């Protein structure tokens, strides 16, 4: 029974020299292993794809292969131009001065000017509201 477990290993040529010789000796006396081995070999042959003639493959390849378009040679140039444009945009963005950064004294002066005016507007609006109600 020990040898019968090696049918798959023998069929896939995974037994070393001594094991292979022993299993081949076992095959001479074991009809079950021979039958299983034949079944494996037939299955493998049935599953193997038959090769098509070279002329058929070439004709099929010629019919299904796309021809190069006019723009195929221009792709690298277009990609390079796009990258150059992107690099220029990024460089211009870096070179622009940061307009969002204010000095603290500028912020305080702006707030005090505008807050005074806003406070007066709010006060007047509140007085009008109170008069109506």
Image: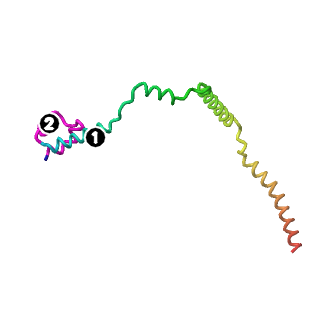
- Which label sits on residue 81? none
Instruction: In this rendered view, identify the residue nearer to me: 111 or 29.
Output: 29
Q: Position of residue 31 (x, y in %)?
A: 14, 43
Q: Position of residue 103 (x, y in %)?
A: 72, 46
Residue 22 found in image quarter? top left
* Figure check: 114 above or below 126: above
At x 20%, y 43%, the residue is: 36
* Figure check: 82 above or below 7: above
Is label 1 in a helix, a strand or a loop? helix
Which of labels 2 and 1 is toward the front? Answer: 1
1 sits to left or right of 91: left
Residue 84 found in image quarter? top right
- Image: magenta residue range: 2-29
Q: For mark 2, does the 10 Å Cα neighbourhood hold few (<14), some (14 to 19), or many (20 or more) residues?
A: some
Is label 2 in a helix, a strand or a loop? helix
Q: Is residue 129 magenta?
A: no
Whether tag 2 and tag 1 are in contact, CB under 8 A, the answer is no
Which secondary structure type mostly characterizes the magenta part of the structure?
helix
At x 83%, y 63%, the residue is: 122
Gap between marks 2 and 1 measured at Cα: 20 Å
Instruction: In this rendered view, identify the residue nearer to me: 107 or 1.
Output: 1
Q: Position of residue 25 (x, y in %)?
A: 11, 37
- Which label sits on residue 24? 2
Q: How many marks?
A: 2
133 sits to left or right of 81: right
Q: For mark 1, does the 10 Å Cα neighbourhood hold few (<14), some (14 to 19), or many (20 or more) residues?
A: few
Instruction: Please report whichever mark, 2 or 1, sits nearer to the chain's N-terminal start.
Output: 2
Q: Is residue 15 magenta?
A: yes
Which residue, given by chain and number where applicable, does mark 1 sit on?
43
Residue most extreme to the bottom: 133
107 sits to left or right of 5: right
At x 20%, y 38%, the residue is: 10
């Amino acid at each position: 029974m020990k040898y019968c477990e090696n049918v798959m290993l023998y069929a896939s040529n995974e037994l070393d020299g001594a094991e292979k010789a022993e299993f081949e000796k076992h095959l001479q006396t074991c009809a079950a292993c021979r039958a299983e081995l034949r079944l494996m070999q037939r299955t493998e042959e049935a599953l193997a794809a038959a090769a098509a003639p070279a002329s058929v493959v070439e004709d099929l390849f010629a019919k299904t292969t796309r021809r190069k378009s006019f723009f195929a040679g221009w792709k690298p140039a277009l990609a390079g131009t796009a990258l150059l444009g992107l690099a220029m945009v990024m460089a211009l963005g870096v070179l622009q001065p940061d307009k969002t950064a204010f000095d603290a004294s500028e912020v305080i002066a702006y707030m005090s000017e505008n807050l005074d005016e806003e406070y007066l507007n709010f006060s007047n609006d509140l007085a009008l509201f109170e008069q109506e109600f």
